[in-house]
Amino acid sequence: MNERVNHPKHYASHPSGVECVDIAELLSFNLGNALKYLWRAGLKEPTAEREDHEKALWYLRRESELFNHSNHKPVSKSARHVVIAFAVKVRRTFPERDESATVPPFDTLIVALSELEHGDDFDLVVESTIAALEESLEPCES
C-alpha cells in the first residue's frame, strides 16, 4: 500500500485522527474541494498556502452561486450528523484563542460545520468561510 497515495500526510496527519476524505466525501463537490484545500494549506507545499486558500475561495464562491440559484444541497440529510460528528472531533483539537484573534479559514469552516443544526444552513457555513478567506488574503492582494 502506497501511503503517499492512499493516506498522504497533508490529509491524514491531523491530531484528531480524522482524515480529510472522511468529511469531504460527504459534502458536495465544491464544498468538499474547499475543505480539501483548507485542510492541506501550508502542509502539502509550505510555500503554496496562499494558493490553497485562493483555490478554496474559488470553490466556495461556486458553491455559494449554486446554493443561491437552485435547490442544491451541499450534503444529504442522512450524512449531516456524520459531518457534524467529524467536525466536532476536529474542532476539539483547536487551541484556545483570545476572542479578538483572527480565526484561520480552516477553523472557521470546521466550526461552522460542527455547529450545524438540522435546518439547511449551509449557506452560512459557506458565507462565513468566504469572509474568513477574503480577510486572510486581503493584506497580500495588490
Image (cartoon, helix red, strand yellow):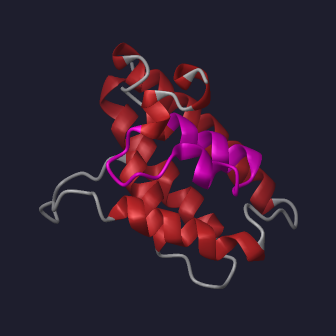
Height in image: 25 above or below 139?
Answer: below
Height in image: 2 above or below 32?
Answer: above
Image-based side of 112 in relation to 122, left or right: left
Q: Any magenta on residue 53?
A: no
Q: Quadrant of the C terminus?
A: top left
Q: Please tell me which residue is depicted at 43% across the width and 29% down the height of the picture.
A: 9
- Classify residue 73 by image quadrant: bottom right
- Residue 3 visible: yes
Height in image: 79 above or below 23?
Answer: below
Q: Please tell me which residue is depicted at 56% across the width and 39% down the height of the picture.
A: 36
- Classify residue 75 by image quadrant: bottom right
Image-based side of 97 in relation to 91, left or right: left
Outermost residue toward the bottom in this view: 118
Q: Please tell me which residue is depicted at 57% across the width and 30% down the height of the picture.
A: 55
Magenta-colored span: 13-37
- Residue 112 visible: no
Residue 68 image point, x, y percent: 77, 61
Residue 78 image point, x, y percent: 76, 75
Q: Quadrant of the N terminus?
A: top right
Residue 137 image point, x, y percent: 39, 33
Height in image: 64 above or below 13?
Answer: below
Residue 129 image point, x, y percent: 49, 53
Question: In front: 13, or 61?
Answer: 13
Q: Any magenta on residue 33?
A: yes
Outermost residue toward the left in this view: 98
